[in-house]
Structure formats: structure tokens, C-alpha cells
Image (cartoon, grey):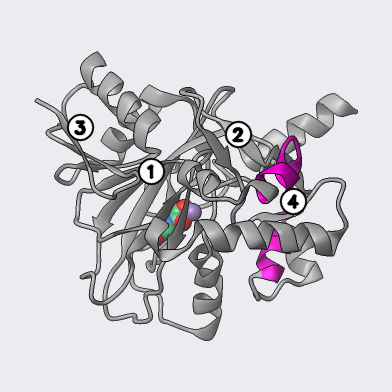
Amino acid sequence: MITVNQLHPLFFGEIVGADLTAEPTEDLRQTVQDAMDRHGVCVVRQGPITDEEHIRFARLFGPLELPPGYGTRPRGRMAPELFFAGNLDLEGNIKPLTPASQNVAKGAERFHADSSFNPLPSKWSMLRGVECPPPEIGGDTLFVDLRAGYAALPQALKDRIDGKMGIHDFWMGRKYAGLEVTDEMKANMPMPPVHHPLVRVSGDGRKAVFVGGHCVGVEGMGEEEGHALVEEIYDIITQPEFIHRHHWTVGDIVIWDNRFALHAATPLDTDQYRRDMRRATINESGDEIDSYEYRRRQKESAA
Ligand code: OGA
Ligand code: MN
């Protein structure tokens, strides 16, 4: 018997009683789909599973978005289909804490939607706790619901964003977050900006405001005006009463809908504890592909 509880007054489901080590059933798929439609973010409470079981579960909901450079880069102990979030190197040893590593981590400490800077049709992320530091040490993940966020906006702001497109730019977002961005970094990883509607409507008719760390401006507005507007919205929707804080237990899988929720990492300012978190990323449609290959094919078909 699978049950779903709500853990925050506004959103965040807890799915209890699923067994992802067994062949997934239609009942499981439908229960998770319904819970995600309603809450936008859910934790599946369940014991440790393998990378293969994680990937099998993710594929019930759409094609995987593969990590950049899929098939060409060494991936160490992990299934190459998964993204890594944590403090371990490819061999699984803790990376020493340095100003540079802390600086990189800062990027995920702003609320964001995964891959919103990519032209792929992003759907969900599923992050699994393989090794988690105790909550008092750090490494919790924070979530906000973008439908509750939209509902909280003053009417004048809703009117200003109605029908407008947000500009999502990976490098600009990092710059605004105060991180170092060099021409060399940009040349090694060219990421032209993409546009997404600032207001999205979910299946049940609820509107969501789609901003977040990679959203740096508004199409048709000046750079400063657009940036100020998305920052104003960001500050409203990330107020404490909208945030759910997830303390990780080994085996948890937290699923978030990147179209209707934002998430943020919290600091882990120590290298005395291991954090091994693995993420499957799911698109709405299309081939299982990484974002570089997707951009390459886009360019090719435009040429
Ligand atoms: C991610 C992410 C946050 C965390 O995996 O996309 O932002 O707490 N993770 O690890
Ligand atoms: Mn993320």
C-alpha cells in the first residue's frame, strides 16, 4: 500500500511504501505522477537502491537528459546516466575543501531549476541520497513551489510578466550570483541564452512564475530593468514561509518538477563528512541525449 502525505502547508509530498527494488507497477507510476502533479516536489522514502534501479524508475516518466559529455568523459563509480551532487572525486574519495570548491558549490545555493539554461524540454529531477552527512553538519536541500509563488505576487507584478519571456543564461546567472566567470570558461562551455515563458500553467490550471538562478532578465526589457524585475520576484517567492527544508536520509529520492518548483543546496563547509548524491534528470520528450549534443544537432539542422 503506497500512501502520500503533505509535509509543508503549501506543497511537498512524502510517498511511503514504494519498493523501487521490484519491477515498477502501473499503480506506482500513477501514484507518483498524481503526487507530483499536486505537489511539484515529493520525497520517496525507501531504502538504498542501485543506480540501475534509480534509472529504471526515472525512465517511467520520460527520456533521461544525460550529463554533459555523456560517453566521452570518465565517470568513476557511478552509472554514466546520472549527474553527481556531493563532495567526492571519481574514485569516491572526499575532495578537500578549498575556496575554489566552495565557490563552485555556491552556484547551486541559489534557488534554481535544473537545466533551465538548456534548450531541452526539461521535466523532472530525481536526486537520491547515497551517503548523507548528518543534518546538523549541512547539506540539506531547500525547495519552493512556483505556483504558491505566483499566487503570492502583487497584481501589478503579475500584470508586468503576463505573456513575457524570461531569459535564462548560465554564465550571466553565475556572474550575478557573484561567482568568477572567465572568457576561458565560456569558450570551453559555450551556453547561448534560451527563453522560457515567465508564467506557466500546470495541468490543473494553476499558474506558476518561472524564474530562478539562471533567469537573468526579461525579453524586450533593458538588461537592468529585466534583472531588477526577476530579482524582485525571486525575493518574494523565496521568503521563509514558502521554503521546505529537506533533511536527507540515506535512500531518499527527492523528485522535483523543474517547471513548477525551485531548489537550492545549502553549504557543506567541511571535508570530514561524505556526501554522495546522484541525480537522474528527465525531459518531457525527445531522445535520451546530453545538452551539448542537443545544441549541436540544433545548430546542424539550422544550417
Ligand atoms: C541538483 C542540486 C542540491 C543539493 O542536484 O541539481 O541542485 O542539495 N542539488 O545537492
Ligand atoms: Mn540543481
> Mark 4, mark 2: which one is toward the viewer?
2
Residue 132 on the magenta segment: no
Q: Which mark is residue 200?
A: 2
Which amino acid, mark 1?
Ala
* Cα distance between the residues tagged 1 and 4: 25 Å
Q: Which residues are magenta?
A: 157-176
Q: What percent of the width, then of the height, locates residue 30?
A: 29, 19
Seen at 14% across and 45% down, the residue is 47
Q: Are marks 1 and 2 in contact (CB under 8 Å)?
A: no
Q: Nearer the viewer, mark 1 or mark 4?
A: 4
Name the N-terminal-most of marks 2 and 3: 3
**N-terminal-most mark, 1 or 4:** 1
Is 165 inside the magenta-drawn segment?
yes
Distance of mark 1 from mark 2, alpha carbons? Answer: 33 Å
**Which residue is identified by label 1?**
79
77 relative position to 234: left or right = left
- Amino acid tagged 4: Met
Q: How far apart are labels 3 and 4 at the CA level? A: 36 Å
As helix, strand or loop, the secondary structure at mark 4 comes to loop
Q: Which residue is mark 4?
A: 191
Q: Residue furthest right?
A: 303
Amino acid type for the residue under numbered disc 2:
Arg
Q: Are marks 4 and 2 in contact (CB under 8 Å)?
A: no
Which quarter shows the C terminus?
top right
